[in-house]
Amino acid sequence: MTIPSSTTFTPATAQAPLALVIGSGFGGLAAAIRLAVRGWRVQVLEKLDAPGGRAYVWKQDGFNFDAGPTIITAPFLLDELWATAGRKFSDDVELKLMEPFYRIRFDDGTWFDYTGDPDRMRAEVARFSPEDLPGYERFLVEAHKCYQLGFIELGGIAYNSISDLLWALPNMVRMRGWKSIWKLACEHMRNPKLRVVFSFHPLLIGGNPLAVTGIYSLINSLERQFGVHWAMGGTGAIIRAMVKLLEGLGGQIRYNAEVRKIDVQPGPGGRPAATGVTLASGEQIPAAIVVSNADTMWTYRHLIEAQYRQRWTDAKIERSKHSMSLFVWYFGTNRRWDDVPHHMMVLGPRYEELLRDIFKRHVVPEDFSLYLHRPSASDPSVAPPGCDAFYVLSPVSHLDSGTDWPKVAESYRQRVEQVLERAVLPGLSKHIVSSRVTTPQDFQDRLLSYKGAAFGQEPILLQSAWFRPHNRSEDIDRLFIVGAGTHPGAGVPGVLMSAKMLEQVLPDAKAFA
């Protein structure tokens, strides 16, 4: 599938207006590429010492660890991005289709292999509950309807005005957007394990399956149509290719360049307008426009003075519901576990109550569910010969839990290690040769994520689409927002689409010349 692009290639000149992009994650780099193609001089300002943001790459002890995203589910969006610059994505990055997509392992040792093969999926459903096959087929129909009405028809709308919302409402009704994906799964299937299998996907983008809209069942349809892919060399290979593409278009990236403030002055008509940024070093950089790929709540709360914010006030930001955070342990071993697939969910004894602990009660309980990523199953380049590279991710509450993560991180890691050793990686503790952890505190301090939330606002219905921070700032002229915290939301497809939204809300560079 290819989504048509309205971009016309217009190379920048030395006299072209300057666009500053804050952050070099997927959203920031995609936005910078699109701006460069449309004739802007582009400079990306990155706080860290290398590109990627949440998709940063850790290199240590001969291992490569992708810090964040690990799958590509809508490769046509990358094909389209490269095409805007007259290039082919496949010339720069090789994608490998995963099979199975994931293995979901339950606490009792049984597992479900989630795949793109329709017959194998029916067989897996029947293995758990033959009587749920008709309900499973109905769920697929519902998921495809949400994909068509939600992703295809509504996903490309910038929701820049209330009329956009009114236009979308009939589709929202047809998709029964008020019903959670958990209730949708329960409506169609009675087996408790199958209900988990077909409702967990929103966790991959920071959503609580008990609360987020059933519209997110569209992920099931998206994966079935286009597959779940691994980028050979890691997700960082895509980031490196995006940097190369941007620099080939004349764009620049400055590292170790943290933005401390977005400079704002009264613009035409008296409305505040972004005029550039001030770095943590004190350096001021004037610009025609500013595009923030930084965490959206952090952008409004910490980079823009309160006097200029009428909608995204401190009180509104505090009242918002924020996504969960993550505890991530990256580790390398001096042996391999070739019976472990590339992607595996290692579930704990609880599902509903664990989700309530994370999203509602904001506590860090003793039990947990894990996502285990073993990229060396598919790609030997990420680990030394005879070794395995892993990361294991535990969804946890954001910093409202009050957890002293620097104090408890090691004990939490040890508990994760014990569960993995008991469940899927026997003998693990004897073979670890490289180790690193990321906690919610790191998400706040290093990645500047508000409350350490890993995915911005929680994607509940009233924090989605028109109700999410807009791609063109409601408060500040000449300020634009891309990334997980704006429409359409988190996940690599969402942030790539947010960059594409700029074409609807931002004129070509010549309009600012």
Image (cartoon, rainbow, N blue to C red):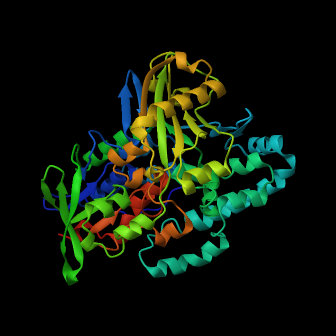
Decide if residue 9 is in sight here: no
Q: What residue is shown at x 25% (from left), y 73% (from top)?
A: 307
Where does the image place residue 412, in percent across and percent down from the top left? 51, 34
Above or below, 479 against 355 in this view is: below
Above or below, 263 against 405 in this view is: below
Q: Is residue 246 left or right of residue 413?
A: left
Decide if residue 168 is in sight here: yes
For residue 475, which quarter of the picture?
Answer: bottom left
For residue 234, which quarter of the picture?
Answer: top left
Above or below, 321 against 195 in this view is: below
Where does the image place residue 248, in percent across and percent down from the top left? 26, 46
Seen from this angle, which residue lies furthest right? 131
Above or below, 121 against 270 in this view is: above
Where does the image place residue 371, in percent across and percent down from the top left? 57, 38
Q: Split into 4 quadrants, where in the image is the C terminus?
A: bottom left
For residue 482, which quarter of the picture?
Answer: bottom left
Q: Nearer the viewer, residue 422 or 69?
A: 422
